[in-house]
Amino acid sequence: DAKTTQPTSMDCAEGRAANLPCNHSTISGNEYVYWYRQIHSQGPQYIIHGLKNNETNEMASLIITEDRKSSTLILPHATLRDTAVYYCIVRSPPSGSARQLTFGSGTQLTVLP
Amino acid sequence: EAGVAQSPRYKIIEKRQSVAFWCNPISGHATLYWYQQILGQGPKLLIQFQNNGVVDDSQLPKDRFSAERLKGVDSTLKIQPAKLEDSAVYLCASSLLRGNYGYTFGSGTRLTVV
């Protein structure tokens, strides 16, 4: 699976949009981009995933560039409870057995009051 | 739906002692994973089960770690004997076998080896 590069940390003002970037320049055509977050003392939580089209759910939006070499996770109105480590993961689709998730170090997002 | 249950929540043991962690995945999830998360790092996969069979245990230190998944449901992870460097959070996750579904993680067991 392709490796990803994320900033170590970011700050965001409460109520503003948080835009978390991720580079995955070696991504293959069938690899998906997943985003998870981990709030302190909890297990990682699934946020969203996508292949090439932009995706939106109740938690966030995922914008994937046309060349698929990078993506941005957008939290439209960040709250203090969004303070967490955010992981961007690239993974091949399951084939026969579910594919593993390989976590990097992620981005520590701190939402400031 | 109920989440992934793990116990205990915290455990403190002395080095060279043994310890076991328990995980109950979401009902119907065929795949179960154990991850180790050392402070300040992302989770690292230790072992992956599909039903009650091992799919990948390449990163499991087999001289001291063992895991089983009886009847394809609950799972236990054991460390014997523990070392100081085993201090970490041990996370269990489960997922459906097919499709691009995300994992569901438990809250983990925080192990401190002194």
Image (tube, coloured by chain):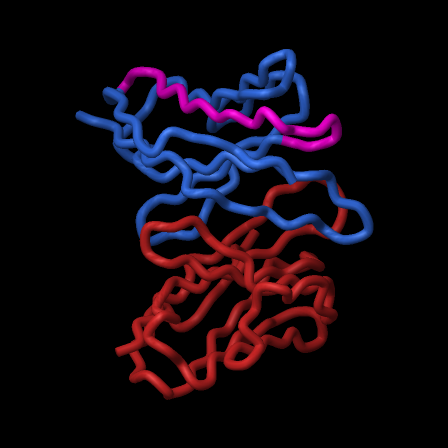
Q: Residue at x 59, y 72 (%)?
A: B75
Q: Residue at x 40, y 81 (%)?
A: B82
Q: Residue furthest bottom?
A: B17
Q: Residue furthest left?
A: A113
Looking at the image, residue A28 sits to the left or right of residue B12; the answer is: right
Q: Residue at x 38, y 50 (%)?
A: B41
Q: Quadrant of residue B7?
A: bottom left
Q: Quadrant of residue B8?
A: bottom left
Q: Quadrant of residue B27?
A: bottom right
Q: Position of residue B30 (x, y in %)?
A: 71, 59
Q: Residue furthest front?
A: A26
Between A93 and A41, the one nearer to me in the picture: A93
Chain A: what color? blue
Residue A29, magenta (yes or no): yes
Looking at the image, residue A6 sits to the left or right of residue B50; the answer is: left
Residue A64, magenta (yes or no): no
Up/down of B80 relative to A95, above or below: below
Q: Main secondary structure of the magenta part?
A: loop
Which chain is represented by red in the image?
B
Residue interval drawn in magenta: A15-32
Q: Position of residue B40 (x, y in %)?
A: 33, 50
- Of the 4 image quadrants, the one containing the N terminus of chain A is top right
